[in-house]
C-alpha cells in the first residue's frame, strides 16, 4: 500500500470546515465570554437604573351573543383590537378628565386575551394610584362600549324583524279586503280564488307570529350579554420585585451577549481565515508539525507538564542540529518571545559540545539586549552575523511576519524550523511564507506549533518531502559511509527539493504554480 503525495484538489475541500470553525470559535472564548459578561452586567444595571413604570392590571369578562363552544378565539382577539382604538381611549380619558391625547394614552396600555371570554387589561402610569385609576376607567369604557354595541346590534336586528312583520300585516290587510269583496257562489273559478286567498291569509298570519317571536328573542338576548359583561378582577397595582427583575434581566442580557459574541467570533473566523488545526497549518506551510508547545498555565500540574514538553522539544531540536552540517534557524510567526526561549534552551543544550552563538535577528530582539547568565551562549544581533567564526555552531533567530526581509533569512540558516502560533497567521500568509522560503532555497525541517488546541485530533504530518522531515533523518545512517553524513543526502539538488515540496502548497491552483516557477 502506498501513500499518495498529491495534495487534495480544491473541489474536495469543503466550503466550510465545521471542525475548524468550532475550534476557532472555542479559542476565541475570551471574546464571547466578555460579551456574555457585558450582557449580564448591562441587564442587571438596566433593571436597577431603569425600573419598570408603575403598572395596574384588571380582568374583564366579555360575553358575546355569537359565543360558540368551538370558537378559536376570534371574538376575544377582536375585543383586544377594539380596546386599542381612540374611541375607547377617548372615553377613558374623559372619565378621568385628563387632557392627554388618546394616541399617547394608547401607548400606555395593552389588552391580552386569556380565554375566549376573559380580557386582561394592563395599564402603566406615573404612580400606582394613577395606574389603578386608568385601568378602572379603561375597563369601564370598554364594558360600556361593548354593552352599547350589543344593544345596538340587538335593537337593529329586532327592528328589522318588526319592519318585516309590519309588511306582512299590510299584505294581510289587503288579502282580507279581497276576501270580503268576493261572494261565495257556484262559480268554480271564484271558489278556487277564494280558497287561495284563505290559504294566503293563513300563511301570512303564521309568518307574522314568527316575526313577533324572533323580535322578542332578539330583545331578550341583550340582557344576557349586558349581565355577562363585567369586571371580574378589580384593578390592582402590580408589585415590582427588584431582585427578581435583576435576575431576569441579567439572564436575558447574558443569553443575548453570549449569542452576539458567538456570532461575532464565527464571523471573524470565517473572514480572517486563520488556520488553527495542525492539519490545516501543515498543509498551508507545506511542512509537517514535528512538535507542540502548550500555552503557559498557572496550575502547578500543568506547569510541570509544559516543562517536560519543553525539555523534549529542546532535546529533539538538539539532535536535529547535531546531525546536520548546515546551520539551523528558528523562524517565528506570532510567538517571538516563546521562540527566543526555545532558541536559548537549544543553545544551552548544545553548549556542552562546543561554542554556540545565537544570532538574534528578530524585529524586536529579546536575547540581544538581555543580561547574560552563567552558562548562557553568546548572543549577537543580526548585523553582526558575519563576525561569527565559521567553526562555531550558529542558531539563527528570525521572523517570517509581514515586513520580513526574505533575502536575509538565508544568512540565519540554510535550513529552518518554523515556530508558529496556532490561529495567528492567515491561510494566505502561510502560503506566502512557504513560497518565499522555497524561493530562498531554505528547506523547512518541520513546524513547532505554539498554543495548539487541546482537543485537536487531526494529523499534522505530510508524507512528502522526506529528505527535509525529521522522520526521514532516521534513514540517513543507513546511507552513511564511515562516520560522516551521507554525500548522497547532501547532493540532493535544489530543483528536486522544490519539485518535492511544491505540490504541498502549489497544487491548490495553477496561479500558485506559476508564482513558484
Image (cartoon, rainbow, N blue to C red):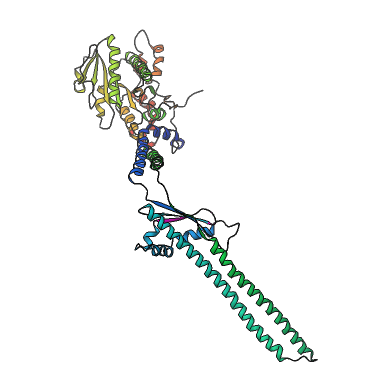
The quarter of the picture where residue 186 lies is bottom right
> x%, y% of residue 249?
39, 42
Q: Quadrant of the C terminus?
A: top left
User: What residue is rendered at 29% in x and 28% in y?
Assistant: 400
User: What residue is rendered at 59% in x and 68% in y?
Assistant: 220
The question of residue 172 being in magenta is answered with: no
Decide if residue 83 is on the left or right side of residue 66. left
Report if residue 172 is visible in the image.
yes
Count of labels in the image: 0
Decide if residue 400 is on the left or right side of residue 262. left
The question of residue 115 being in magenta is answered with: yes
Outermost residue on the top side: it is 482
419 to 197, vertically: above or below: above
Of 144 and 309, which appears nearest the observer?
144
> x%, y% of residue 157?
57, 72
476 to 176, vertically: above or below: above
> x%, y% of residue 208?
65, 77
Of 304 and 223, which appears nearest the observer?
223
Q: Which residues are magenta?
A: 108-117
The quarter of the picture where residue 98 lies is bottom left
Outermost residue on the right side: it is 186
Decide if residue 100 is on the left or right side of residue 375. right
The quarter of the picture where residue 344 lies is top left
Report if residue 272 is visible in the image.
no
Of 88 and 60, which appears nearest the observer?
60
> x%, y% of residue 450?
35, 25
Amino acid at each position: 500500500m502506498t501513500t499518495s503525495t498529491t495534495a487534495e484538489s480544491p473541489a474536495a475541500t469543503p466550503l466550510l470546515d465545521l471542525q475548524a470553525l468550532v475550534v476557532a470559535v472555542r479559542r476565541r472564548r475570551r471574546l464571547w465570554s466578555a460579551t456574555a459578561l457585558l450582557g449580564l452586567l448591562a441587564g442587571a444595571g438596566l433593571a436597577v437604573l431603569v425600573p419598570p413604570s408603575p403598572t395596574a392590571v384588571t380582568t374583564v369578562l366579555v360575553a358575546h351573543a355569537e359565543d360558540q363552544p368551538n370558537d378559536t378565539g376570534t371574538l376575544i382577539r377582536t375585543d383586544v383590537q377594539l380596546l386599542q382604538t381612540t374611541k375607547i381611549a377617548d372615553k377613558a380619558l374623559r372619565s378621568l378628565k385628563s387632557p392627554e391625547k388618546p394616541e399617547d394614552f394608547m401607548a400606555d396600555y395593552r389588552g391580552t386575551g386569556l380565554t375566549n371570554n376573559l380580557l386582561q387589561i394592563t395599564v402603566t402610569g406615573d404612580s400606582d394610584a394613577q395606574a389603578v385609576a386608568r385601568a378602572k376607567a379603561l375597563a369601564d369604557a370598554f364594558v360600556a362600549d361593548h354593552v352599547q354595541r350589543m344593544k345596538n346590534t340587538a335593537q337593529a336586528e329586532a327592528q328589522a324583524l318588526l319592519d318585516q312583520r309590519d309588511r306582512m300585516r299590510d299584505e294581510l290587510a289587503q288579502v282580507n279586503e279581497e276576501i270580503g269583496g268576493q261572494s261565495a257562489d257556484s262559480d268554480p273559478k271564484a271558489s278556487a280564488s277564494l280558497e287561495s286567498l284563505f290559504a294566503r291569509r293563513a300563511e301570512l298570519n303564521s309568518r307574522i307570529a314568527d316575526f313577533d317571536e324572533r323580535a322578542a328573542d332578539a330583545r331578550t338576548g341583550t340582557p344576557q350579554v349586558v349581565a355577562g359583561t363585567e369586571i371580574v378582577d378589580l384593578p390592582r397595582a402590580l408589585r415590582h420585585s427588584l431582585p427578581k427583575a435583576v435576575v431576569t434581566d441579567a439572564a436575558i442580557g447574558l443569553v443575548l451577549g453570549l449569542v452576539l459574541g458567538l456570532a461575532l467570533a464565527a464571523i471573524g473566523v470565517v473572514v480572517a481565515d486563520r488556520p488553527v488545526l495542525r492539519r490545516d497549518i501543515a498543509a498551508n506551510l507545506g511542512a509537517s508539525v514535528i512538535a507542540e508547545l502548550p500555552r503557559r498555565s498557572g496550575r502547578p500540574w500543568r506547569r510541570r507538564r509544559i516543562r517536560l514538553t519543553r525539555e523534549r522539544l529542546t532535546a529533539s531540536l538538539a539532535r536535529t542540529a547535531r546531525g546536520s552540517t548546515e546551520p539551523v534557524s528558528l523562524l517565528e510567526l506570532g510567538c517571538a518571545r516563546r521562540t527566543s526561549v526555545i532558541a536559548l534552551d537549544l543553545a544551552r543544550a548544545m553548549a556542552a559540545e562546543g561554542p554556540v552563538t545565537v544570532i538574534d535577528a528578530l524585529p524586536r530582539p529579546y536575547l540581544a539586549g538581555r543580561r547574560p547568565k552563567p552558562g548562557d551562549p553568546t548572543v549577537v544581533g543580526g548585523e553582526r552575523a558575519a563576525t561569527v567564526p565559521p567553526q562555531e555552531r550558529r542558531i539563527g533567530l528570525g521572523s517570517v511576519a509581514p515586513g520580513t526581509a526574505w533575502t536575509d533569512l538565508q544568512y540565519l540558516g540554510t535550513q529552518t524550523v518554523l515556530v508558529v502560533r496556532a490561529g495567528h497567521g492567515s491561510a494566505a500568509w502561510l502560503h506566502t511564507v512557504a513560497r518565499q522560503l522555497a524561493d530562498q532555497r531554505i528547506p523547512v525541517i518541520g513546524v513547532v506549533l505554539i498554543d495548539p488546541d487541546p482537543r485537536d485530533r487531526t494529523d499534522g504530518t505530510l508524507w512528502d518531502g522526506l529528505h527535509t522531515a525529521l522522520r526521514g533523518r532516521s534513514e540517513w545512517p543507513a546511507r552513511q559511509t564511515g562516520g560522516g553524513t551521507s554525500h548522497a543526502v547532501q547532493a540532493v539538488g535544489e530543483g528536486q527539493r522544490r519539485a518535492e515540496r511544491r505540490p504541498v502548497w502549489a497544487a491548490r491552483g495553477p496561479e500558485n504554480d506559476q508564482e513558484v516557477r
